[in-house]
Amino acid sequence: MPLIHSLYPLLRPLLFKLDAETAHEWTVKMMKFAHGLGLLKSEIRNPKSEITVMELKFPNCVGLAAGMDKSASAVDAWLACGFGHVEVGTLTPRPQHGNPKPRLFRLIKNDAIINRMGFNNPGISAAVAQLEKRSSQGIVGVNIGKNFDTPNENAADDYLKCLRAAYRVADYIAVNISSPNTKGLRDLQAEEPVRRLVSALKEEQAKLSAQHGTIVPLVVKIAPDLDTTQIEMLARVFSEMQLDGLIATNTTLSRTSVEQHPFAKEAGGLSGAPLNQRSTEVIAAFRQLLPKTIPIIGVGGIMSAADAQVKMNAGASLVQVYTGLVYRGPGLISEIAKLPSS
Ligand SMILES: Cc1cc2nc3c(=O)[nH]c(=O)nc-3n(C[C@H](O)[C@H](O)[C@H](O)COP(=O)(O)O)c2cc1C
């Protein structure tokens, strides 16, 4: 087991003394430093955990969810920690600062986080440059979005720019239309805009695959705050467009079960334990409606291997974690990575 896994119970109280965003920055720096010293070497390699999804061979089912490494600066470190894949971003065409601070809040007694980061990121070119410097193999997804000041009518241009820029360095591309922290972004989940966007991206994917000789799968990341009619509509559109995969879900606007918390009224998306059940319901609903050719990556409130197994029983082929990593530490990765693939 890497040293960092056993050290986390000691590190966590220190990190939790810092404000949440500073702790996050320190964590990424520490990961890079520890990796540089060779302290992260993970021995988790179990042929029984290997799984092929979207024609990509994943060493295990657990990945790092988008948002933790927005600039793709520590990919080698995350992979060395035992993750079977890492999703970087969200990246936008131009760099942007995101929303004013404070914008990240821990709801410790609920094992939850509220964030309204607003796609703070160095821009797609800087992230691509980072990915070109990678020293390890391993699957990397590039999560793409639009700049905050790009109107929705022109959103496709932003996503297309990011798709073209990242195509060479990505194993898959995740199209984020579900962050609650970019005004109007979730409106792209409505029928007409989603149809237009996905069809433009699929068309470009076909051109790029002819150019590069490889098909980089295109997956869409959706919100948990969709009703049954919206889920049915999206499943129909994704099936028709032959989307390569779905990520369910992003953070929620709901505050059910955290209403009593002093931070409950902070604007932003809620993640962690309170999101667990809803994200599983959304995965199960899509699994019923989508053809088997469209795999689902399940994310939302996974705090243990048992939670990951519930997501897979609901129809997820792979899972991702973010908030669970903050509260449980990197031991969570090895716990989930040991699960046999089904
Ligand atoms: C601080 C923070 C920042 C996030 N940033 C992004 C992002 O940039 N893009 C994205 O698609 N999801 C982002 N997410 C959502 C996560 O990828 C994930 O979908 C969500 O947090 C639910 O998983 P969890 O309960 O394991 O955290 C972010 C989540 C958090 C907590």
Image (cartoon, rainbow, N blue to C red):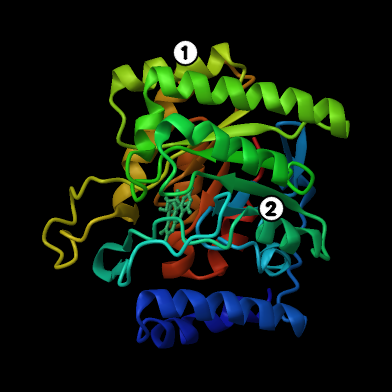
Cβ atoms under marks 1 and 2 closer than 8 Å: no
Disc 1 secondary structure class: helix
> Which residue in the rendered view is the most extreme toward the left?
260
Q: Position of residue 110 (x, y in %)?
A: 26, 62
Disc 2 secondary structure class: loop
Describe residue 30's horizontal placement relative to residue 310 as left or right: right
Q: Which mark is residue 144?
A: none
Q: Residue visible at 77% across and 54% down?
A: 138
Q: Classify 10 Å Cα crowding around label 2: few (below 14), some (14-19), many (20 and above).
A: many
Residue 75 falls in image quadrant: bottom right
Is any atom of residue 98 visible in this view?
yes
Residue 45 falls in image quadrant: bottom right
Q: Does any atom of ligand 1 lie closer than 8 Å to the CB of label 2? A: no
Is any atom of residue 44 visible in this view?
no
Considering the image in quadrants, where does the N terminus appear?
bottom right
As drawn, 185 above or below 324? above
CA distance separating discs 1 and 2: 30 Å
Q: Mark 1 vs mark 2: give the one in front.
A: 1
Q: Residue 236 carries which label?
A: 1
Q: Which amino acid does label 1 sit on?
A: Arg
Q: Residue visible at 34% across and 51% down?
A: 181
Residue located beneath label 2 in the image: 84
Considering the image in quadrants, where does the C terminus appear?
top right
Q: Classify 10 Å Cα crowding around label 1: few (below 14), some (14-19), many (20 and above).
A: some
Q: Where is residue 320 in the image (x, y as percent from the top left)?
A: 54, 49
Describe residue 210's horizontal placement relative to residue 172 as left or right: right
As drawn, 232 above or below 91? above
Q: Residue visible at 37% across and 85% down?
A: 18
Q: Which amino acid does label 2 sit on?
A: Gly
